[in-house]
Image: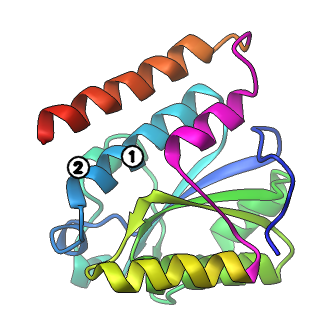
Amino acid sequence: MASPQRLTAPNSALLVVDVQGRLMDRIDRRDEILRNIVTAIKAAKLLEIPVMATEQYPSGLGPSVPEVAALIEHRPAKTTFHCCDSAEILGSLNGWGIRKVTLVGIEAHVCIAQTALELLTLGFVVQVLADAVSSRHPADRDVALRRLELAGAVVSTTEAALFEWTETASHPLFRSISALVKESDIARIASQ
């Protein structure tokens, strides 16, 4: 059963998984997914939530897309599908006292799923943003999200996560977060 707790900003981190050009070009709903990933990164940075990213076998799959690379300079390489074999990622989470990890990226049924399952096994509360993860095939994404929810991950959306991180309209950064949401909405409408 998924965690009933609200996933507020304290003790939280955002993990951006493998948003690399050669993979992203083949991802279902690419532009929408990338827009939501970028929105989540910008919001986390505003709220001083630690943001980390990985790249799966970058010598073969290429670097992160420019939109992500511009926001996250350091992106450790990995060859294991899940991110928890990276001493840097796991060491940072534990070192910072992080207990709640929000995942965005690709592919939902491989690296996102395996990372979420590994984090759950290690005792983290895991949130997966359904509108900021995808796969090449919609069925793979949909089955992965159902599987992760059954395993105990919280499946949410980018906007829901942003407002859960701020908790209240009186938060000092509420207007900045609201502006990011509006900016994302405008971009979504313009792309239709």
Foreground pick, 111 / 52: 111
**Start and end of the magenta stretch?**
151-170
- Where does label 1 land, which residue? 36
Would residue 90 appear left or right of 65 to someone viewing this image? right
Image location of residue 154, percent across then percent down? 69, 63
Image location of residue 176, percent across then percent down? 52, 15
Q: Which color scheme did the rendering employ for the protein?
A: rainbow
Mark 1: few/some/many CA within 10 Å (<14, 14-19, 20+): many
Marks 2 and 1: CB-CB under 8 Å? Answer: no
* Residue 86 in sight: no
Task: Residue at 50% x, 87% y: name it.
Answer: 81
Quadrant where the N terminus sits is: bottom right
Would residue 146 appear left or right of 38 to someone viewing this image? right
* Residue 180 in sight: yes
Task: Residue at 81% x, 46% y: name it.
Answer: 6
- Where does label 2 land, which residue? 66
